[in-house]
Image: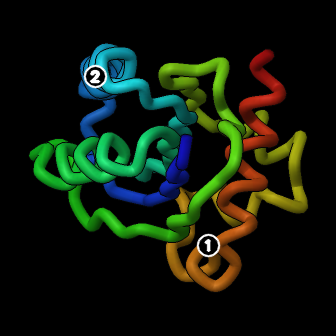
Amino acid sequence: MALLQLIYVSDLVGRDEAQLASILESAVRHNREDGITGMLLYSGGNFLQVLEGAPASVKATYQRICDDPRHRNTMVLLEQDVDERHFGDWSMGYRQLGPEDVARFPEQAPYFQYGFRNDALRAKPGEALDLLEMFCKGML
């Protein structure tokens, strides 16, 4: 079965962190229904997320996110076919990054310390996947 992996960044509208729980609940519910797996990171008003699954489902999920009024400035960093899921254990893993993560991962901190740096991640999209995998493995 062909799988699509899509990584994007977006901004939380108004940096209203009270919305995080409902965003995560919605993601988990929809992803289970649609066979999507992935990981969602939040830092400084920004999201970095990977979605994996059947191409049509991933694209529909991404479009739903683009249409969600809680997200803005949504931008795809990486879209690629994969042979297997990298985040298969998660209908939607989640981690909110903070100062303790900056201290633990000083080499990666410039990418997320003040929110996800779109320019840096666009220049090195593999770094986005590395960040997602690093924090996902830390949760298992």
Residue drawn at the location 75% of the way across and 36% of the way down? 135
From this view, report whether residue 87 is shown above or below residue 26: below
Which mark, by number, is residue 32?
A: none
Residue drawn at the location 30% of the way across and 17% of the way down? 33
* Mark 1 lies on residue: 121
Coordinates of residue 66 in the picture (x, y in percent): 20, 54
The answer to whether residue 109 of the structure is visible from this angle is yes
Identify residue type, mark 2.
His
Sooner in the amino-acid sequence: mark 2 or mark 1: 2
Residue drawn at the location 33% of the way across and 56% of the way down? 11
Q: Is residue 26 left or right of residue 70?
A: right
Q: Are marks 2 and 1 in contact (CB under 8 Å)?
A: no
Could you classify mark 1 by the number of other residues whose Cα lies within 10 Å: few (under 14), some (14-19), or many (20 or more)? many
Which mark, by number, is residue 30?
A: 2
Q: What is the quadrant of the N terminus in the image?
A: top right
Cα–Cα gap, marks 2 and 1: 27 Å
Query: Which residue is at the front of the view, 100 or 92?
Result: 92
Could you classify mark 2 by the number of other residues whose Cα lies within 10 Å: few (under 14), some (14-19), or many (20 or more)? some
Query: Residue 31 sits in which quadrant?
Result: top left
Query: Which residue is at the front of the view, 3 or 49?
Result: 3
Residue drawn at the location 43% of the way across and 42% of the way down? 54
> Comparing marks 2 and 1, which lies closer to the viewer?
2
Coordinates of residue 96 in the picture (x, y in percent): 56, 31
From this view, report whether residue 77 is shown above or below residue 140: below
Identify residue type, mark 1.
Leu
Number of residue marks: 2
Q: Is residue 37 left or right of residue 61?
A: right
Q: Is residue 93 left or right of residue 83?
A: left
Q: Please say which color scheme the image uses.
A: rainbow
